[in-house]
């Protein structure tokens, strides 16, 4: 029996080793030879773009992604590929499918601008939707589609041009029923994130901020529709928010050009017959030569800002690891060939200390003679603005959510909940404030004073650095701070950002600060350099942030707690650390 047991163990170990080597070898082979085995592009082609797919700010670091056969769209790569296609005689047209409503308005603006440049080349750009919204909100999809030379809508579809709305959950009533007492403080009146726990509806400043945000988005959308559809702005404004329109109604109102099906729309783009073979935009982009010229480091920070360096072997899009980003800045500073840094920021904020770490590295880069240009994506608010405000130039999309210069902190007190559950706690301590973050008791007067002094210091630091970075009088900066969010357009009008646009504008700003000619080439190099596939696989199997057994246990716990997920998500945002974060429910 022992020999049999050993045989089984050895066999299983051998199979496991073979699987690991096979998977690792596959990853290595694809990463090493992937570009070489990429199918050659046809002599004539129409590029296809799935606008319902997931869009990322940087390529996935998932070691298994390359084996899936699926291409992830990276926003800057999509823009670069569309711009290259406009000048490529082999590309005869652009065909995009949309309608799922997944893109934030700022990302839609970035892609829309690239499509407009493509259309200006005289080549057909066709957008097709089975439906835009189907009972939901198709406003962003329709806004994006108006950049195309033709819009096709399936006869059975609808056009959900219903406008924008924002709804914020207020869980105070639920907390009261459960016996949970929020003890929270913020700086200042527009820093409304804590109000989801302490109020039952919008306060006047909160409502004012949200109304201004939606008004700016609506005005931008109406202006884009009027320009793209060549209709008067009054007509576009009259149609905005009046959907959903039946397909025939949308055609009659001039909102779409044709009713038909995908094959008909594809033919209109030249993607059938002898005109051109349909090629995915990502595949086309993979064949484009890398730029040459002045070396520019590209650093991306996306997600909630936190201390440390991301341990997730798969590269979590929702985490903005300060140690990783700071090291990328240090590497770029130490590289004498790097003349500038293009810092892409997409974040609602996060840890104050982590944000300050990155802010310091931005300053070090400038002191070392490296120009820094920030390109804001969908949002760069609170901590996201903190890491951006010290750059030489700051670029945002008109719809980018930014500002939110403020801070909040606090905790949830569960003492009454434990009483209701029949649970008692006891403990000992050394130090008056040793238990100040305990959820089992309220803040003592002394602890509450320390918390508020900390918030005052953070707010003063934030506003002082913002005023210096934006070369603005402290009194003026204070008027724009107080935790208030702004769209990129409103922020630019108030001096919080320098220019409006996406990657093309950001690169133009890089050339400007380096005193280069507008058509001078740039060699864009990502920092930090991607880890090798073998290292990623070893990290995953070694359990550093990727232990499969632990992950399975966590997943089981999450399944049990799923019924409380909406409330838990709100409570999670109110951690004990001082937080620079965007108020909730601020996206369409």
Image (spheres, rainbow, N blue to C red):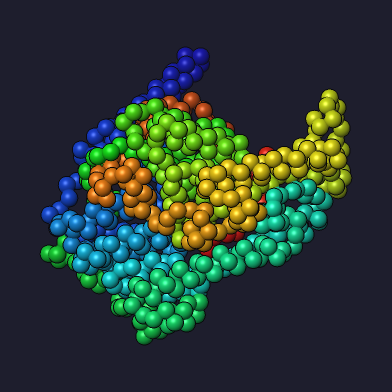
Residue 269 is left or right of residue 356, and the answer is: left
The count of marks equals: 0
Q: Extreme front residue here?
A: 473
- The residue sitting at 34% across, 76% down in the picture is 229
- The residue sitting at 80% across, 52% down in the picture is 178
Camera-nearest residue between 97 and 214: 214
Residue 85, quarter of the rendered image: bottom left
Residue 2 in view here:
yes
Q: Position of residue 179 (x, y in %)?
A: 82, 51
- The residue sitting at 76% across, 43% down in the picture is 452
Q: Extreme top residue here?
A: 3
Residue 520 is left or right of residue 400, and the answer is: left
Q: Position of residue 324 (x, y in %)?
A: 48, 33
Residue 483 in view here:
no
Residue 121, quarter of the rendered image: bottom left
Camera-nearest residue between 189 and 315: 189
Q: Is 249 located above or below residue 80 in the figure?
A: below
Q: Is 460 located above or below residue 269 in the figure?
A: above
Q: Position of residue 80 (x, y in %)?
A: 29, 51
Q: Is 90 located above or below residue 268 in the figure?
A: above
- The residue sitting at 61% across, 64% down in the picture is 210
Residue 380 is left or right of residue 261, and the answer is: right
Camera-nearest residue between 460 and 266: 460
Q: Position of residue 319 (x, y in %)?
A: 52, 41
């Amino acid at each position: 029996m022992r020999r049999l047991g050993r045989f089984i163990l050895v066999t299983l170990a051998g199979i496991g080793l073979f699987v690991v080597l096979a998977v690792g070898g596959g990853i290595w082979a694809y990463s090493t030879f992937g570009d070489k085995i990429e199918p050659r592009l046809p002599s004539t082609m129409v590029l296809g773009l799935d606008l319902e797919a997931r869009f990322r700010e940087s390529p996935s670091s998932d070691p298994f992604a390359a084996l899936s056969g699926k291409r992830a769209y990276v926003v800057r790569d999509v823009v670069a590929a569309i711009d290259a296609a406009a000048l490529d005689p082999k590309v005869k047209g652009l065909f995009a499918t949309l309608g799922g409503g997944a893109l934030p308005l700022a990302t839609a603006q970035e892609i829309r601008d690239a499509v407009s440049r493509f259309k200006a080349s005289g080549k057909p750009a066709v957008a097709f939707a089975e439906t835009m919204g189907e009972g939901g909100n198709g406003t962003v999809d329709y806004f994006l589609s108006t950049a195309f030379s033709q819009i096709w809508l399936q006869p059975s579809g609808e056009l959900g041009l219903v406008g924008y709305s924002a709804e914020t959950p207020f869980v105070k009533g639920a907390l009261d029923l459960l016996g949970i007492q929020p003890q929270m403080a913020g700086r200042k009146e527009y820093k409304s994130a804590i109000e989801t726990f302490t109020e039952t509806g919008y306060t006047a400043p909160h409502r004012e901020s949200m109304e201004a945000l939606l008004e700016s988005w609506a005005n931008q959308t109406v202006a884009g529709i009027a320009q793209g559809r060549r209709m008067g702005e009054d007509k576009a404004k009259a149609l905005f928010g009046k959907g959903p329109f039946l397909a025939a109604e949308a055609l009659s109102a001039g909102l779409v050009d044709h009713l038909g099906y995908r094959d008909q729309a594809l033919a209109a783009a030249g993607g059938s017959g002898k005109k051109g073979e349909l090629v995915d935009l990502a595949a086309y982009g993979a064949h484009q030569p890398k730029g040459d010229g002045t070396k520019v480091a590209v650093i991306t920070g996306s997600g909630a800002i936190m201390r440390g360096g991301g341990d997730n072997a798969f590269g979590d899009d929702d985490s903005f690891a300060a140690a990783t980003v700071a090291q990328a800045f240090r590497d770029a500073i130490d590289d004498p060939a790097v003349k500038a840094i293009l810092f892409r920021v997409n974040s609602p904020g996060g840890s104050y200390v982590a944000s300050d770490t990155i802010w310091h590295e931005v300053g070090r880069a400038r002191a070392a003679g490296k120009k820094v240009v920030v390109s804001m994506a969908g949002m760069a608010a609170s901590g996201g603005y903190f890491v951006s405000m010290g750059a030489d130039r700051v670029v945002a999309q008109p719809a980018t959510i930014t500002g939110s210069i403020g801070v909040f902190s606090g905790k949830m007190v569960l003492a009454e909940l434990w009483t209701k559950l029949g649970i008692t706690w006891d403990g000992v301590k050394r130090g008056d404030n040793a238990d100040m973050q305990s959820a089992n008791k309220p803040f003592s007067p002394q602890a509450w004073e320390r918390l508020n002094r900390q918030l005052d210091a953070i707010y003063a630091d934030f506003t002082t650095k913002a005023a210096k970075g934006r070369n603005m009088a402290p009194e003026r900066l204070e008027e724009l701070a107080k935790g208030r969010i702004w769209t990129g357009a409103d922020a630019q009008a108030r001096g919080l950002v320098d220019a409006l646009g996406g990657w093309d504008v950001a690169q133009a700003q890089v050339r400007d600060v380096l005193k280069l000619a507008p058509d001078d080439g740039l060699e864009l190099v990502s920092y930090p350099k991607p880890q090798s596939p073998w290292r990623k696989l070893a990290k995953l199997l070694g359990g550093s942030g990727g232990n499969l057994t632990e992950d399975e246990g966590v997943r089981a716990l999450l399944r049990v707690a799923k019924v409380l997920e909406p409330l838990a998500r709100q409570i999670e945002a109110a951690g004990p650390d001082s937080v620079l974060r965007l108020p909730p429910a601020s996206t369409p």
